Amino acid sequence: METQTTVAVPIESDGLRMHVATQIASDIQSSVAAALNVQQNKVIVETKRCGGAFGGKLDNSLPGAIAVAVAAHKHKRECRMQLSIKDNMMTAGKRCPFKLEYKVSCDAEGKILAVSGTAYADNSGAPTDFAQAYSIPNWDVKGVTCNTNTPRNTAMRAPTHLGEILFIETVVDHVATLVGKPAEAVRALNLGPGPYGKPGAEVGSPLPMIGDAGLPMQAAPAPAVPEELPKM
């Protein structure tokens, strides 16, 4: 994918026209204006297209854009920056890490009966939708957001969803190992109803909600559908 890229061109009245590969053009404008101590209307930010973003060009596009803007403003010359893939990977921060702790109960066939545990997220939103495509009757699972003294990571496409999938698929693989069956067979045994579960399930079927351990999971009510769309 395209690395962090910025071009800054001085214009009249101490202004700058900037071409930045960014997902947050407004933040680039306000941050550059603050760094240069000029009004925001003197900084014009254009983003023609982003060659690879998915969260990687949110806050990560700011440091390079500010540095290029300062150089162009000081020397009154066009200035540009495009990071190498190595430097880009060093600065981008990668996905937010998760730590998973769990206990699982299953029968001899690999049917999962209960799951309890915690998913710790470092500098990310707490995961909550752990069940995914599976129907498991008893839950006591929570997501916890942790504030640590580690460098900030990158918001990447579906930042909590990946942790949720990793959680339940790790549990399923663990159960398959315990009962001595192929993981695919255990997955098929535990698939639940709904659009993400067994093939042929009706789209819009209510998915189970996470409940307390020892209690049956309650079905989520089907979303209300308005009789007619509001007129524009």
Image (cartoon, grey):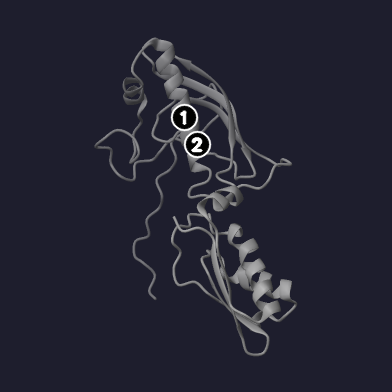
Left or right of 139 on screen, residue 43: right
Q: Which quadrant is home to the N terminus? A: bottom left
| Residues at discs 2 and 1 in contact (Cβ within 8 Å) | yes
Q: CA distance from mark 2 to mark 1?
A: 7 Å
Q: Position of residue 135 (x, y in %)?
A: 40, 29
Q: Relative to residue 38, is residue 113 depicted above or below?
A: above
Q: Which mark is residue 189?
A: none
Which quarter of the figure is the C terminus placed in? bottom left
Please tell me whether mark 1 sits on a helix, a strand or a loop: helix
Is 80 in front, or is 119? 80
Check disc 1 and report the residue beneath it.
168
Q: Position of residue 3 (x, y in %)?
A: 50, 58
The answer to whether residue 14 is above or below residue 150 is below
| Residue at point 39%, 34% (across, down) | 133
Q: What is the crowding at mark 1: few (fewer than 14 residues within 10 Å), some, or many (at least 20)?
A: many
Q: Is residue 214 above or below residue 94?
A: above
Q: Quadrant of residue 187?
A: top left
Residue in the image at 46% along x and 64% along y: 50
Give amino acid for label 2: Glu
The numbered dot on residue 164 is: 2
